[in-house]
Image (spheres, rainbow, N blue to C red):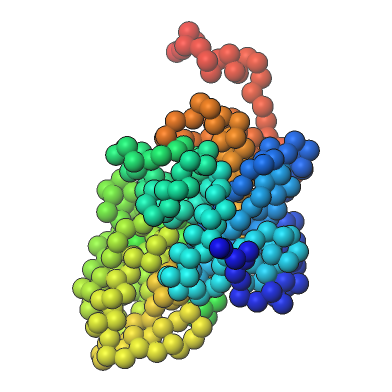
Amino acid sequence: MSILHDITDSSLASEGKKRISWAQKDMRVLQIIKEQFKKTKPFEHITIGGCLHITSETANLAIALKEGGARVYLCASNPLSTNDAVAASLVKDYKIPVFARKGEDNKTYYKHLNSVLDQKPHITMDDGADLVGLIHSKRTDCQKNILGSTEETTTGVIRLKAMEQNGTLKFPVLAVNNNLTKHMFDNRYGTGQSTLDAIMRSTNKLIAGSVFVMCGYGWCGRGIAMRARGMGARVIVCEVDPIKALEALMDGYEVARLIDAIREADVVVSSTGGKHIIDRKHFQAAKDGVILAQSGHFDIEVNKQALAKLAKKKKQVRRFVEEFDLGKKRIYLLAEGRLVNLAAADGHPASVMDMSFAGQALSAKYIIEHSSELKKKVYTLPLAIDREIASLKLASKNVSIDRLTKEQERYLHSWQEGT
Ligand code: ADE
């Protein structure tokens, strides 16, 4: 028998409610979708299980889905990213069951995922593909109910693509991360701002004049590097893809191998999706006092086991800052090497999550409307829907843009006019 919810402290609900309404003000696209859902009830008789970061932004998504008729159940997609006050308000004020406690251990994390799956969802929403992973391994009993799933993040989409390619994927998935209105904004401006915010909140170090090493120059890395430079850091980019490395160089950054860059680094952030990016040899080469943080999905980018082995002592020196004393130098790891922007700050601002979660909400609706024709594949929402999200966002910011005249449109679709 599964319990109805599992949260840290229900007395935090009033603080959570304030946070949810604060975020709502900046989620105007999602509010429009919510109003449409209220009228059309696309999710009547549908259960949605979400494994997402439990934040005030996610709360607004869950509320919109519930207004659309869904029964919504939530668990966290990371043991450290839950806002306990928001979880409490969702349960108390919005009657949305949540299974998540900030700081939960691995066993509890999976118990919570299982509690959501016990509800036999028709649609799952993942941020990192953990629910889908379970439904394909220990919880195959859930497969028959599933119409489809949505995936929020780059790492999750990579996992799902691999499943599609080797034929293991059992139902359709909408890759929300593929939306242009998602990765161009959430990954770049969201991760850029929230990662710097987390580093500053947890360390209170001055960024100006520091040497800031960025591992990875994908959409997240671009955003983080841009914001670090904007605050006056000297930014060095480390990237294994020669095209991205070249892009970083032409964007005006220094580009180097990590083993060289880390010798002078004050801060190193990894956002690559890869494993053991910052490894034993890098710890050995680093200078005293270096700060390490990770802004990728899984806590595997910093080799924590190797760091712990090298350390003679370790201690907590500030909230979310652990000191590893290697004898001749000290290394500081933020937020246990977990995604720092959600663990040590509030995650991406609501205004950018507005577009990501508009994509989530419309993807869920798309699954309902197209379930008979969707195959066991990873899909991207049609560009027209992506553009509609952008248009609504512009309108919410009172920005008007030009439109092509008939003649300009004709010209762009023709080949006859030339030199
Ligand atoms: N991912 C990054 N930031 C987030 C936020 N504020 N809410 C939910 N998921 C997120």
Which residue occupies 49% across, 73% down? 104
Residue at 29% over, 71% down: 303
Q: Which residue is at the front of the view, 343 or 40?
A: 40
Quadrant the N terminus occupies: bottom right
Q: Residue sitting at 61 percent across and 75 percent down?
A: 8
Residue at position x 52%, y 64% in the image: 112
Residue occupying the far left of the picture: 281
Position in image of residue 71 (x %, y %): 66, 50
- Left or right of 362 in this view: 171: left
Q: Give the image quarter of residue 284.
A: bottom left
Observer-nearest of 209 and 123: 123
Count of marks overlaid on the render: 0
- Left or right: 261 with respect to 399? left
- In this orientation, which residue lies closer to the viewer: 151 or 190? 151
Q: Position of residue 417 (x, y in %)?
A: 49, 10
Pick the front one: 267 or 235: 267
Q: Is residue 220 left or right of residue 34?
A: left
> The C terminus is located in which quarter?
top left
Instruction: Evaluate whether residue 145 shows in this view.
Output: yes
Task: Point out residue 96 in the picture as x, y percentages from the top left corner.
Answer: 68, 59
Q: Is residue 371 above or below residue 105?
A: above
Q: Is residue 285 above or below residue 43?
A: below
Measured as percent of width and height from the top left, residue 56 is found at 65, 62
Residue 253 in sight: no
Residue placed furthest toward the top: 416
